Image (cartoon, rainbow, N blue to C red):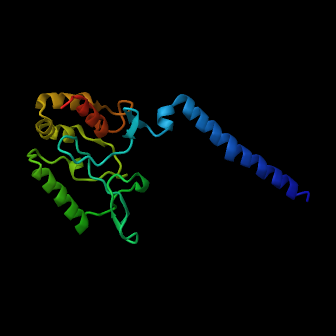
């Protein structure tokens, strides 16, 4: 009993400290100092959550900026024993893990390239137009990929191409702290800005 009592006291003490006090303190600090980030960086429009600035969405309309392909998957609703592609499934963040000799990867790259050409885009194909990100949820694309879509978007929205290009240029986010990562464009934010143009 002389050994059991101190062990139980320490168990209860550290459970209270590390299981209750610390998580509540961290959550409280997060909510007080960084409420948007602590709640998922949600994007709200007209009082409704339309997405997150950190998770991509599968925009497919010619009126919108298209994201990079996504490698996420989910169980098939018709047959849960099978797995099917489910682009931007936030519950299954993953890369494809397909190697350079993979037939499936080659077929996907060919299909993405064909979709690029099928949309009437003649510029050289940017890498992020056909390849997936490591998470499968990347909300950003390169400025080059975004600008390559400007003519298609302008035609679909009946806007001057220069106006679309200017909007994309104004949406470019620089490197984090000026040194980390690459310049990028948030697809959801640009599509919101396009919708505000009224066409």
Residue at 37% across, 65% down: 77
Asked where in the image residue 188 lies, by quadrant, the reply is top left
Image quadrant occupied by the N terminus: bottom right
Horizontal relation, residue 64 to residue 97: left or right = left
Asked where in the image residue 123 lies, by quadrant, the reply is top left
Q: Is residue 193 above or below residue 63?
A: above
The location of residue 164, given as percent across then percent down, is: 17, 31
From this viewpoint, is residue 52 visible? Answer: no
From this viewpoint, is residue 46 visible? Answer: yes
The location of residue 24, given as percent across then percent down, is: 64, 39
Residue at 39% across, 41% down: 54
Q: Is residue 88 above or below residue 156?
A: below
Residue at 18% across, 46% down: 126
Is 164 or 113 nearer to us in this picture? 164
| Picture mark count | 0
The location of residue 89, given as percent across then percent down, is: 37, 54
The location of residue 193, given as percent across then percent down, is: 26, 31
Image quadrant occupied by the C terminus: top left
Is 53 or 109 nearer to us in this picture? 53
Horizontal relation, residue 54 to residue 164: left or right = right
Is 83 or 47 nearer to us in this picture? 47
Q: Is residue 84 above or below residue 9?
A: below
Horizontal relation, residue 35 to residue 130: left or right = right
Residue at 23% across, 68% down: 103
Q: Is residue 43 above or below residue 110?
A: above
């Amino acid at each position: 009993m002389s050994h059991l009592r101190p062990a139980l006291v320490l168990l209860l003490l550290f459970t209270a400290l590390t299981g209750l006090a610390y998580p509540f303190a961290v959550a409280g600090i997060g909510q007080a100092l960084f409420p948007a980030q602590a709640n998922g960086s949600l994007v709200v429009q007209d009082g409704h959550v339309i997405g997150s600035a950190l998770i991509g969405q599968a925009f497919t309309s010619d009126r919108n900026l298209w994201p990079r392909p996504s490698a996420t998957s989910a169980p098939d609703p018709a047959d849960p024993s099978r797995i099917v592609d489910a682009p931007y499934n936030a519950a299954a963040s993953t890369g494809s893990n397909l190697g350079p000799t993979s037939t499936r990867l080659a077929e996907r790259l060919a299909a993405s390239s064909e979709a690029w050409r099928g949309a009437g885009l003649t510029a050289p194909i940017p890498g992020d137009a056909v390849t997936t990100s490591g998470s499968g949820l990347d909300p950003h694309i390169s400025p080059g990929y975004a600008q390559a879509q400007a003519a298609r978007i302008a035609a679909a929205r009946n806007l001057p191409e220069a106006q679309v290009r200017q909007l994309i240029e104004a949406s470019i986010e620089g490197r984090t702290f000026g040194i980390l990562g690459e310049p990028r464009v948030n697809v959801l934010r640009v599509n919101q800005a396009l919708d505000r143009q009224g066409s």
